[in-house]
Image (cartoon, helix red, strand yellow):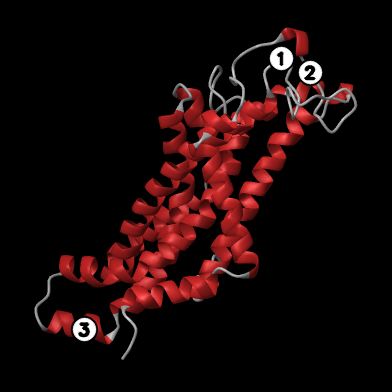
Amino acid sequence: MPAPATGRVRATLREALTGATLVGAILVAVVLIMVVAAPLVAIHDPVQQDVTHRLAAPVFMPGGTWRHPLGTDGLGRDLWARMVYGLRTSLLISVPAVAVAAALGVLIGIAAGYFGGIVNAILMRVTDVQMAFPFIILGITLLSVYSPGPVVLIVVLSLSAWPVYARIIRSIALVDAGSEYVLAARAMGASHWRIITRYLLRNVAISMLILSTLDVAAVIILEALLSFLGLGIQPPGMSLGTVMADGKDYLSTGIWWITTMPGVLILITLLGLNLLGDGLQGTFDPRLRRT
C-alpha cells in the first residue's frame, strides 16, 4: 500500500535534510533560538551603558574578559547583547516584509498567468517598472518623506521584493493554466475563483515558501544597509545595521570588532538561510529558478 501523504512528506524531508542542507537547517535553528530566547541569551541589557568598560576588547583579544565576551561599544554597551537584539529586530522586519511581498507577488503572478491577455500585459509592465527602479533610490525617497520605523521599513522592503515573486509565479501559473486538470475543471463549470484557490495556489505554495526562505536573506541585507545609512531603525532601537554603524567611527583606531562582529552574525544567518533554501529547492521544486 502507498504510504500516507504525511509519511511521504517526512521521508522527503529526511532525504532533503542531509549534507549542506542539514548544516543550513542547524544554523537557522540556532538563529531562531537566539531570537526567541533573546532575554536569556543576551546576558546583559543591550541599552545599559558602562563607561568604565567602554570599547572593551573581545575575550579572544589581549585585555578581553568574559564579562563582555565580544567587547563593548563606545558607550560601554555589551556588543553581544546588542547583536542578539539587533538580530531579533532584523528578523522581525525582514520576515513580515517577505510575507507581504510574497502575498502581493503571488496574487499578481497568478492573475497574470491565469487570465493572460491584457491582464498579463498590464501587470507585467507594472512589474517591469518596479524591477527597473533602483531599490536604494526608492528606499531613500520613501524613508526621507516618512519617519523611519518598523512599519515603514516593512513597506519599503516589500516593495523591493514582490516583483521577483510575480515573475516566477506567473511562469508557473502560465503552464498550469493550460494543463489538463484546469481545462477539465473549466469544462465542468468551475469558477475562476475555485480554480485559482483550489488548484493554482496549491501548486505554487511550495515554490513560494522556498523562494521566501531565500528572500529573507536578501531582505536582511537590505534592512541592514538602510539602518547602517541611518535610514532604518532609529536609536534607542537597534538592528544589526545600526550596531555596525556604531563602530564605523572607530575603525581607523583599530577597534574593528564593533562593526565586524555583527557582520559575521549576518553572514552566518545568510549562510544558513541560503543552504536551507537551496537544499529544499533542489528536493521539492527543482524547476524553481531565479534567473
Task: Compare residues 58 and 197 and report the one nearer the observer.
Answer: 58
Farthest residue, direction top: 52
Q: Residue 138 versus residue 222: which sits nearer the camera?
A: 222
Horizontal relation, residue 271 to residue 219: left or right:
right
Front position in the image: 223 or 37: 37
- Residue sitting at the far left: 189
Q: How far apart are marks 2 and 1 (CA)?
A: 6 Å
First in sequence: mark 2 vs mark 1: 2
Q: Is residue 67 left or right of residue 125?
A: right
Question: Do we see residue 113 in this rendering?
Answer: yes
Point 40% across, 31% down: residue: 151
Answer yes or no: do the residues labelled 2 and 1 have beta carbons within 8 Å? yes
Specify the amino acid type for callout 1.
Gly
In terms of secondary structure, where does tag 1 sit? loop
Residue 244 percent across, percent down from the top left: 69, 29
Residue at the spot of label 1: 76
